[in-house]
Amino acid sequence: MVIDLTTLIDLIIGHYGAEGETYADREALANLDKVEEILENILSQLLTNAEGCDSFRKSTAEIGEKSYEIIKDVQTAIKQWEEE
């Protein structure tokens, strides 16, 4: 059995979407704390990586550039969501 990364993360975090049912929504709200922790950790690492965009080390620069692209993509998605 092969589990993709997104499914694995969802299994670890648990349900975190609103359903309009008190018990399920309380559980989802608690699980959002896990989401917040994971997102903050990932964002922090991406920002640290992005600082290496101009590194003379090729691999560090590649990781920095890819991290910067991811940050910009997330930023664009948030801006689009805000405009809707």
Image: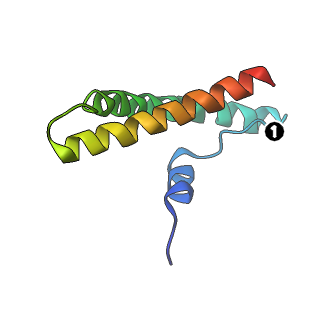
Left or right: 66, with 55 as reference point: right
Reading the image, the residue beneath label 1 is 19
The image shows residue 82 at horizontal and vertical percentages of 73, 21
| Looking at the image, residue 48 lies above or below residue 4 | above
How does the figure colour the protein chain or chains? rainbow
Q: Quadrant of residue 63?
A: top left
| Looking at the image, residue 79 lies above or below residue 24 | above
Left or right: 63, with 58 as reference point: right
Residue drawn at the location 55% of the way across and 36% of the way down = 73
Which type of secondary structure does the marked residue at label 1 adopt?
loop
Residue drawn at the location 85% of the way across and 34% of the way down = 20
Q: Residue furthest bottom?
A: 1
| Looking at the image, residue 9 lies above or below residue 52 | below
What amino acid is found at the position of numbered circle 1 in the picture? Glu
Residue drawn at the location 31% of the way across and 37% of the way down = 64
Left or right: 63, with 80 as reference point: left
